Image: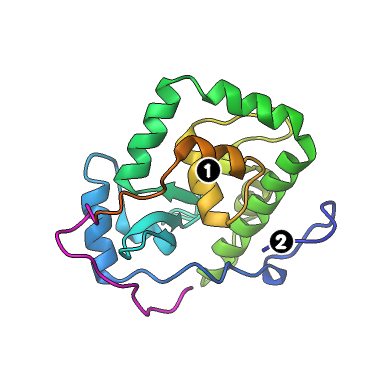
Amino acid sequence: MPAGDPEKKLKPEEISLPAFWSGVSESDVESLAKQMKKRKFDASSVIAVAKRCKSGFPQVIVSSPLSRSGSPFPTLFWLTCPFLDRRCGELEAARLIAELEKLFERTPEAVRKMHKDYAALRLRAAGASLTAPMSKKAVDVLSRLGVGGIDASVAPNAVKCLHLQTATWLGMGEHPARRWLAEKLGALECGEARCSARPRGRPNERRP
């Protein structure tokens, strides 16, 4: 993970991908298709699974920062777990986005670091799956924009949605509001392997 001087511009090759990310198996693709059946989803864009439940099913995936055409796609993490997706929706309905924005306002340095770390990790993830150099435009977008494409120079305290913030926390393993998120979300999984009739173990595929 990015670390050290927050002002230093890290090169993609200087950034390590999180060790807890894992590769995507065929059974993962099948599970994701079921989890995302009501949402637009392209399995070919998934480059890793960032977080799994105890039953081994994907909860957060890592999406390629570049489209097939090479255009930048700034949202790195996607929340796929139906249990967490529903819980985030409930919290948004309770108008808790404004509460999180106020928390961000009280921790500007931590929020600033989150955006920088996210951008650096996204650039590394893009580079790890490339067979040709990125365009100058893609490098600029992926290195400049923060979490989920938020322009931190304009709206650093923007939340967008709790699904995004939860996916970012679980995908990176850190977040300036991790305690708040943990408290509000409560349980992080259903505990019943609802994504399948049979629980299964974690696959052994290599991470990217």
The residues colored magenta run 193-208
Q: Which amino acid does label 1 sit on?
A: Ala
Whether 167 is among the magenta residues is no
Left or right, 197 with reference to 183? left
When the figure is inspected, residue 101 is found, relative to residue 5, above or below; the finding is above
- The local crowd at label 1, few if under 14, some if 14 to 19, many if 20 or more residues have their Cα within 10 Å, is few
Q: Name the residue under label 1.
A: 182
Tag 2: residue type? Pro
Instruction: Choose between 42 and 204: the one closer to the eye.
Output: 204
| Label 2 secondary element | loop
**Towards the viewer: 51 or 192:** 192
Q: Indicate the position of residue 136 as horizontal and vertical percent values.
A: 66, 54
Relative height, residue 23 to residue 149 (above, below): below
Residue found at x 38% / y 28%: 90
Magenta-colored stretch includes residue 205:
yes
Please name which of the two marks, 1 or 2, marks the residue nearer to the observer: 1
Identify which residue, 4 or 188, lies in the foreground: 188
Find the residue positioned furthest to the left: 197
Q: Kindly report the secondary structure that dominates the magenta region of the rendered protein.
A: loop
* Residue at the spot of label 2: 2
Q: Where is residue 64 in the image (x, y as percent from the top left)?
A: 47, 57
Q: Is residue 119 above or below residue 21?
A: above
